[in-house]
Image (tube, rainbow, N blue to C red):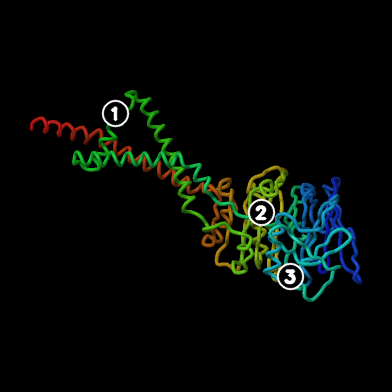
């Protein structure tokens, strides 16, 4: 695979086209060479690096801080940014990249070189409580002290990709990306369920109090008392069979809804993948080896639109080509848009890859899609599956993973996307409630009347 050691690539965005300039140093002077240009007229052409036309980049032309390529196998960790063609601001790494970048500098002990139009700045990115500072110190230098084992790159060459993607129907856009925070169920979801919880608690409390009072007064058994209550309620139903059936159905439906709400609340309280949301520091911790990422659509992260954001972080990963091709074949049958197909080098320490891709011809879907994260150094495979379970419970991808590594799958559930659990709880509840009602009907229609008649007769005789 082609690499670009010692060179960096600067993307310049205009209204109708994107130009990528190759920037390198010759005798301490920067040389800029335009190597790739995408325009609105090039949608059916392929560039010399082997990628399909990157139309989706046009949606990002107004974003500040685009990193086009970042690599440091044996060279300093070059950073390419773009502040916009009409920007008058100083060069910097802005927005959602800054926190991640500072952590990387601190943890991996490297310095940042910032390349922008016609000049270069070199230095650390430092952050205080009020602002971010960039200390520049001259032109590009391949100094020994800048070398480090951190490897961050966004691949421009994609020879293997072209064998897997149909250029006429697929659009693949690779960009550097990070994930800020995994959204987890919070307090407001519990508050949202409070009316149901309160009503249910009051109902249970009232029934228990009534049963205890009845037991204290009559000395009957719990079953008899509860059945007598049910008999009284059953006798209040309409005598018409259809009306009675309608009322019972309404009660069952209400019980079903309450059960689902209780399942959600229970999941909020109990079923949580970790006790706290993952932070950037957690994701970059070398001891964790792998991390994670996906958030909602780009609209929710970047306040932009018309695109999806699928991000991931991997550490020291090797993917088998057969696995990649098989997953791709499966994903062709599963109508999702977001997936990961990458070839990694053994020397790679970290990848921060965020990309948009589309198997279908539509680019307007804002759903959250599956991020599949694989790490061969871990004893298990981590599958972060947000909506695939909900959309495709029997999807090809799920079947493939379950068949190959059933013991290596863990799910990270976001909010109430626990469809399988909810269905199990709800069906179980329906069966239980149905059985209870059947037993109580049997008791009330046979045992209770005879028992009550016998008791009244005995009392009268006394």
Residue lying farthest bottom? Answer: 144
Are the two marked residues, 3 and 2, in contact with CB atoms closer than 8 angstroms? no
Give the numbered dot on residue 110: 3
Residue on which disc 2 sits? 339
- Residue drawn at x 83%, y 66% is 7
Q: How many marks overall?
A: 3
The numbered mark, 1 or 2, whose residue comes first in the sequence reads: 1
Q: Secondary structure at mark 3?
A: loop
Residue 232 in which image quadrant: top left
x then y, percent, for residue 203? 36, 39
> Which of the marked residues, 1 or 3, is nearer the chain's N terminus?
3
Q: Are marks 1 and 2 in contact (CB under 8 Å)?
A: no
Of pointers 3 and 2, the one earlier in the residue sequence = 3
- Residue 276 is situated, as x and y percent measured from the top left of the image, at 54, 57
For mark 1, give the secondary structure.
Answer: helix
Q: What separation in Å lies between label 3 and label 2 (alpha carbons)?
A: 31 Å
Q: Position of residue 33 (x, y in %)?
A: 90, 61
Secondary structure found at label 2? loop
Label 1 belongs to which residue? 235
| Dot 2 crowding, Cα within 10 Å, few <14, some 14–19, many 20+ | many
Q: Are there few (<14), some (14-19), or many (20+) residues within 10 Å of tag 3? A: some
């Amino acid at each position: 695979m082609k690499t670009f050691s010692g060179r960096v690539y600067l993307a310049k965005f205009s209204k109708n086209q994107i130009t990528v300039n190759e920037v390198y140093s010759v005798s301490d002077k920067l040389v800029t060479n335009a190597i790739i240009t995408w325009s609105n007229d090039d949608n059916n052409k392929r560039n010399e690096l082997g990628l399909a036309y990157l139309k989706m980049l046009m949606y990002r032309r107004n974003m500040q801080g685009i990193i086009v390529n970042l690599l440091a196998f044996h060279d300093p960790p070059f950073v390419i940014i773009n502040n916009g063609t009409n920007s008058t601001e100083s060069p910097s790494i802005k927005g959602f990249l800054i926190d991640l970048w500072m952590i990387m500098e601190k943890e991996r002990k490297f310095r940042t070189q910032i390349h922008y139009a016609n000049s270069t700045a070199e230095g650390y990115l430092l952050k205080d409580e009020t602002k971010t500072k960039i200390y520049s110190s001259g032109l590009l230098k391949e100094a020994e002290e800048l070398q480090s084992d951190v490897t961050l790159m966004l691949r421009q060459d994609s020879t293997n990709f072209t064998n897997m993607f149909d250029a006429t129907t697929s659009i693949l856009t690779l960009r550097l990306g990070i994930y800020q925070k995994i959204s987890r169920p919070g307090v407001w979801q519990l508050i949202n369920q409070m009316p149901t919880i309160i009503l249910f608690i009051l109902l249970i409390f009232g029934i228990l109090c009534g049963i205890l009072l009845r037991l204290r007064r009559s000395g009957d058994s719990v079953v008899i008392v509860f059945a007598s209550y049910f008999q009284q309620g059953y006798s209040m139903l309409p005598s018409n069979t259809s009306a009675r059936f309608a009322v019972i159905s309404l009660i069952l439906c209400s019980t079903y809804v309450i059960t689902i709400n209780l399942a959600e609340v229970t999941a909020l309280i109990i079923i949580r993948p970790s006790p706290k949301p993952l932070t950037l520091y957690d994701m970059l911790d070398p001891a964790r080896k792998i991390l994670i990422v996906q958030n909602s659509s780009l609209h929710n992260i970047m306040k932009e639109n018309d695109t999806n954001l699928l991000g991931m972080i991997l550490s020291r990963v090797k993917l088998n080509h057969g696995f990649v091709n098989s997953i791709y074949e499966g994903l062709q049958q599963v109508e999702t848009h977001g997936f990961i197909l990458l070839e990694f080098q053994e020397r790679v320490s970290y990848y921060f890859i965020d990309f948009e891709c589309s198997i279908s011809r539509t680019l307007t879907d804002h759903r959250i899609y599956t991020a599949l994260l694989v790490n061969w150094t871990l004893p298990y495979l981590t599958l972060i599956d947000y909506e695939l379970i909900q959309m495709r419970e029997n999807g090809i991808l799920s079947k493939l993973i379950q068949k190959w590594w059933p013991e290596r799958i863990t799910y990270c559930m976001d909010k109430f996307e626990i469809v399988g659990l909810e269905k199990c709880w709800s069906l179980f509840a329906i069966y239980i409630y149905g059985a209870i009602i059947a037993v109580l009907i049997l008791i009330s229609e046979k045992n209770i009347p005879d028992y009550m008649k016998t008791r009244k007769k005995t009392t009268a005789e006394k």
